[in-house]
Amino acid sequence: MITSRTAKECGTADFGWLQARYTFSFGHYFDPKLMGYASLRVLNQEVLAPGASFQPRTYPRVDVLNLVLQGEAEYRDSEGHSVRVKAGEAALLSTQANVSYSELNTSEKQPLTRMQLWLDACPEHENPVTQKMALPNTKSFLLASPDGEAGSLQLRQSVWIHHLDLAAGEHISIPIRGPRAYLQSIHGQVDAQGSASRECQKLACGDGAFIHQENSLTVSASTALRALLIDLPV
C-alpha cells in the first residue's frame, strides 16, 4: 500500500529568518498521529535567510542527515568539530549526549536550503562524529546505510537511504528490504508503483508517501525529479 502525504498537508513555519515544512511533528507543529515513521523521527525542508543560524542545541540520540540543496552551511559542535557543506553535498552528524550543535548559513547574500532527517541511533553503535560526501551525478545511488556500503554515509541504524535524480520519462525500480519505506519528492512529479498492490500514486513537488508491505518500488519521473527513498526495516 502507498499512502501519500502532500506538501500542503505538512506543518509549516515562517519566522522571517526561517521558512520550513515539517513532515512529522516538530517544534510548534504537533500531530499525535505523526510523531515519526519507524526509526525516521524528522523530515524537514528548511530555508535559512542569509547569515541566519540555529543556536547551539542538544539532540536525542539520533543521526542527523543534512542534504544541502542551495547555498552553504557550517555545522559546529561544542567539542570543537566543524564541517562546511555546500549545494550538492550531504553531511551526517552522529549526535552525542551532552554535546550541543549549531548550524549557520555562511552566506550574507544567499539563502540556505536543505533537507534534514533525524534517524534513531542504536545505543551500542558509534560512528565518526561527522561524515560528509559529494553527491555523484547518477540517476540512483545509496546515500546512507548501516555499514557504509558503496561509499555511502554510515548510519547507527538499519536504514538505507537512496538518492534519485531522474530525467523526465526515466524510471527505476528499487528493492525494499522491510515492511516500511518513505518516498520524498524534493522537486519534480513522480508516479510511484508498488510490486504487491500494483497501485500507482502520483506525487507532486514536495509530496511524500508512506510505503507499506511492498517488496519493491518503481519510480517514474513525469518531470525532472530529485527524490529520496528511505528504506526502514526497523
Image (cartoon, rainbow, N blue to C red):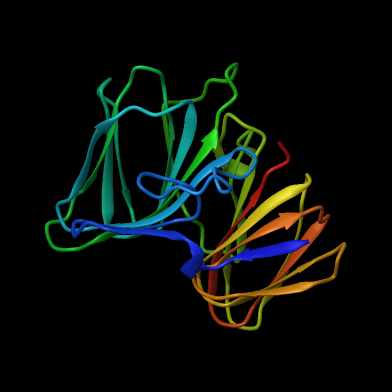
In the rendered image, the vertical position of residue 215 relative to residue 205, given as above or below? above
Q: Residue at x 55, y 76 (%)?
A: 204
In the rendered image, the vertical position of residue 36 relative to residue 123, given as above or below? below
User: The C terminus appears in which quarter of the rendering?
Assistant: top right
Q: Residue at x 53, y 20 (%)?
A: 126
Residue 123 image position (x, y, % from top left): 57, 18
Left or right of 74 in this view: 59:
right
Left or right of 98 in this view: 32:
right
In the rendered image, the vertical position of residue 20 relative to residue 147, given as above or below? below
Q: Residue at x 50, y 65 (%)?
A: 9
Residue 60 image position (x, y, % from top left): 44, 27
Q: How many marks?
A: 0
Left or right of 2 in this view: 4:
left
* Residue positioned most to the front: 32
- Front residue of 153/67: it is 67
User: The N terminus appears in which quarter of the rendering?
Assistant: bottom right
Residue 203 image position (x, y, % from top left): 60, 73
- Front residue of 60/131: it is 60
Residue 149 image position (x, y, % from top left): 65, 39
* Residue positioned most to the right: 196
Q: Residue at x 40, y 58 (%)?
A: 88
In the rendered image, the vertical position of residue 17 relative to residue 25, given as above or below? below
Q: Quadrant of residue 140?
A: bottom right
